[in-house]
Every structure is written in structure tokens, then in C-alpha cells.
Amino acid sequence: FESTRARSLLVPSESAIDYIEWAEDANPYKRASSAFPHAGTIFVDNSIRKFIADGFGSALPHATILSAPQEIRQLRERKSSAEIGLMKCANEVHTSIRDQSRGADLAMY
């Protein structure tokens, strides 16, 4: 994770942003699994890529990773104004990083 680059982005936020860092050769799933100290069952979005679910499954061997049932999916479809704002912000950050990396890729050749 390139925390230096992430910190340089202008991310609109009313509170401090915590950046989770790990060494390039470290397992990001192990690092992220610290957010689940007493993991039992973890439901993931049905559209999540399999390698991500597998990564968490390996990092959390005592947890059960399952696709979210219909009831959870329906709850996740409802968004408050604050959640919509966060989604827009995340999209802007992603778009900015993608555009910057495309420019860097072209400059390499």
C-alpha cells in the first residue's frame, strides 16, 4: 500500500483519516484481520472477488467467510446521505489514483 501517495490525496473528511500500512512483502489480509479480533462469521458482498474472500479466510482460520444472505444485502442497499457522501468520496479517490497511475504508466514507456 502506498501510504505516502494516499496521504497526498485531498480526501474531504470532517475527521482524521487512519491509513493502514503494511510492508510490500507483508500479507495485507493479516494486517486487516486485526479489525476482527473475535471473528465468528464474516459475511462478504456477493460480488467480492474470490481471492479477497480466500485471503481473509487464510488470515482468519477460525472465522467462517460466507456470502451475505438476502436480508443483509437488502439492508446494505439502503444508504443514508452520509453513506452516499462517503461512496462519492471513495469513487473520487479511486478515479484520481487510477488517472494518476495511467499517466505514470505512459511515462514509463
Image (tube, rainbow, N blue to C red):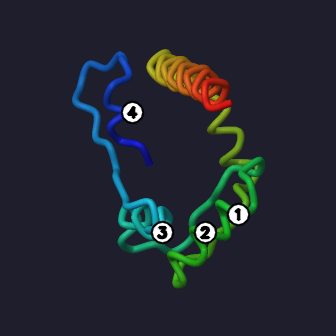
Left or right side of 61 for 69: right
Tell me: residue 54, above or below residue 17: below
Mark in front: 3 vs 2? 3
Q: Which mark is residue 6?
A: 4
Task: Classify mark 4: helix, strand or loop.
Answer: helix
Spatial CA distance of label 2 from label 4 is 23 Å
What's the residue at 68%, 30% (across, down)? Answer: 109
Residue at which label 2 appears: 55
Q: Mark 3: which amino acid? A: Asn
Q: Quick one: label 2, few (<14), some, or many (20+) residues within 10 Å?
A: some
Q: Which mark is residue 13?
A: none
Whether label 2 touches label 1, CB < 8 Å: yes
- The residue at the far left in this view is 16
- Mark 3 or 2 closer to N-term? 3
- The front one of 28 and 86 is 28
Q: Earlier in the sequence, mark 1 or mark 3?
A: 3
The image position of residue 60, as x and y in percent, is 51, 77
User: Disc 2 vs disc 4: which is toward the camera?
Assistant: 4
Q: Give the residue type at disc 1.
A: Phe
Q: Position of residue 104 (x, y in %)?
A: 57, 27
Q: Give amino acid for label 4.
A: Ala
At mark 2, the secondary structure is: helix
The residue under label 1 is 51
Check disc 3: other Cα within 10 Å, few if <14, some if 14-19, many if 20+.
few
